[in-house]
Image (cartoon, rainbow, N blue to C red):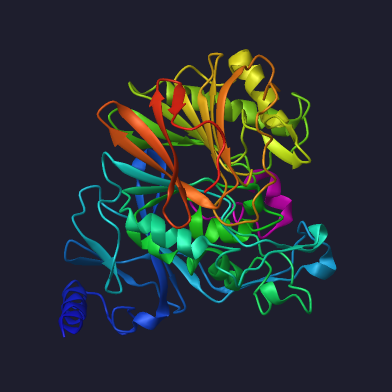
Amino acid sequence: MQKFIGLALAMLIAGCNGLSDDNDEASQPEYLQYSYVVAGANGAAIARAISTHDTCPVLMVGGKGMRMQLRAGSGTMPQRPTASAPADSKPSGFPVITCEATLPADAASASIGGQPLPLPLPKAQPQRIVILGDTGCRMKKADDAFQDCNNIDQWPLSRIAATAASLKPDLVLHVGDYHYRETACPEGVAGCKDSPWGYGWDAWQADLFRPAAPLLEAAPWVVVRGNHEECARAGQGWFRFLAPEPYTPARSCNDARNDAVANLSPPYAVPLGGGDQFIVFDSAKAGSARLPVNDPQSLNYQLQLMSVARLAGGVRGGSFFASHHPVLGYLPLGDNTFVGGNLALQDAMAQVNGLAYYPAGIQLALHGHVHDFQALTFASDHPATIVSGNGGDDVSPALPSPLSPLAPAPGVTLERITHSTTFGFMLMERGGNGWTYKAYTAGGKVMATCSQQGRRLLCDRTGRIAA
């Protein structure tokens, strides 16, 4: 009865504000698929709604209603070149619309279709921040890799999302790679039988929105773009559903002729209070090979890194560099072999900052891409690094333990590393003496706790750890 009265009041208020409720999700909530909040530049809180209706829903803020703006309409996008062969690709179907509205900084309450949005929006000084990445379920013909998407032990994103939401975070940082269901599940492979595939809404819903729903409802998200969201892969959904910048034809990934523009977004800062901030950097197209420093892509990275330096120099606290590809982490290759961080980014960063790689204001780097957990601190003057890429996709081979003294980049000296290939996520927590970081398993067991002191991490465990 209370829920009915609440919906009726919301409809009445919307009507009093001159908004028709004939097509509102408040009266037909089944049309509203998902509602959530994306944190944009300078902490702007962007409310998003995904709906099967052809009209955007009403956003209620502090008892007043406003019609949300259409971000992207429904439709099937013509098939474009993808990372897969044409025979293993298909047009991307989006039988949903995406709507958005920027929330007032002083909003005390907000809801869409009777569903409350996470508040505050985002919190001016978040205390608890969940960090996760590489969360989708791998289906990729080129690698003959078909994960058991139907087994929560083999693909535990729903468990991770529920566990992380139970910790009541104020903010979520996803470090990229939301979507992995690229090609069709082969006949006779039971683990992914009947799974949607491709880059349309059905695959996005299966890979992210349905399993991650508890965490989307728990807190606003800071979204980092991964290589799986570049234009030849799931970029169309990235721009429709997640990217904080405006949606335009040139920045939609629908037309491959615009890929050079759409595959790189400018860095931006999300304030965390106390003078701290995330700086979000788009490394989606960094690849794994070295780039000539005069290559247009490297030159673009160098310009973006100059922007990072300006952003990092504009706060009195610490800046946390959030990008998908680890710069000073390790990539395990199996058979106890591994390589250092991303060569293209290292070279571009060295052009801007020398062998310091990062500007002085960066205290910590946060990444995904490698499907494990790594916490690294350096004897050289480089920011500590955390890799949190164990959020659901097939985990990487384990790094050797002990780790041989391979420098992740020229001029960098590793002091200590803590690492694991157990599925899980991180919790970044503010305390009286700064930030602490806890690595959790999918079920909520703490694997390691690290405290931050300037550019260093002190972890209670070192080397390889198991659940």
Using the image as rendered, state which of residue 120 and residue 16 is in the foreground: 120
Instruction: Tell me which residue sits at (83%, 66%) in the image.
Output: 86
Answer whether residue 235 is magenta in the image.
no
Q: Is residue 15 visible?
A: yes
Side (left or right) of 209 relative to 20: right
Relative to residue 29, is residue 174 depicted above or below? above
Tell me the quarter of the image containing the N terminus: bottom left
- Residue 154 picture location, percent across and down: 61, 63
- Residue 135 picture location, percent across and down: 56, 56
Image quarter of residue 81: bottom right
Relative to residue 140, is residue 326 depicted above or below? above
Magenta range is 246-262
Instruction: Tell me which residue sits at (65%, 65%) in the image.
Output: 199
Using the image as rendered, state which of residue 455 and residue 336 is in the foreground: 336
Image quarter of residue 255: bottom right
- Residue 240 picture location, percent across and down: 53, 61
Relative to residue 380, is residue 427 depicted above or below? below
Relative to residue 454, is residue 166 depicted above or below? below
- Residue 342 picture location, percent across and down: 69, 32
Using the image as rendered, state which of residue 346 and residue 388 is in the foreground: 388
Q: Is residue 266 visible?
A: no
Answer whether residue 247 is magenta in the image.
yes
Side (left or right) of 187 relative to 219: right
Instruction: Tell me which residue sits at (45%, 78%) in the image.
Output: 54
Q: How many marks?
A: 0
Instruction: Tell me which residue sits at (17%, 61%) in the image.
Output: 62
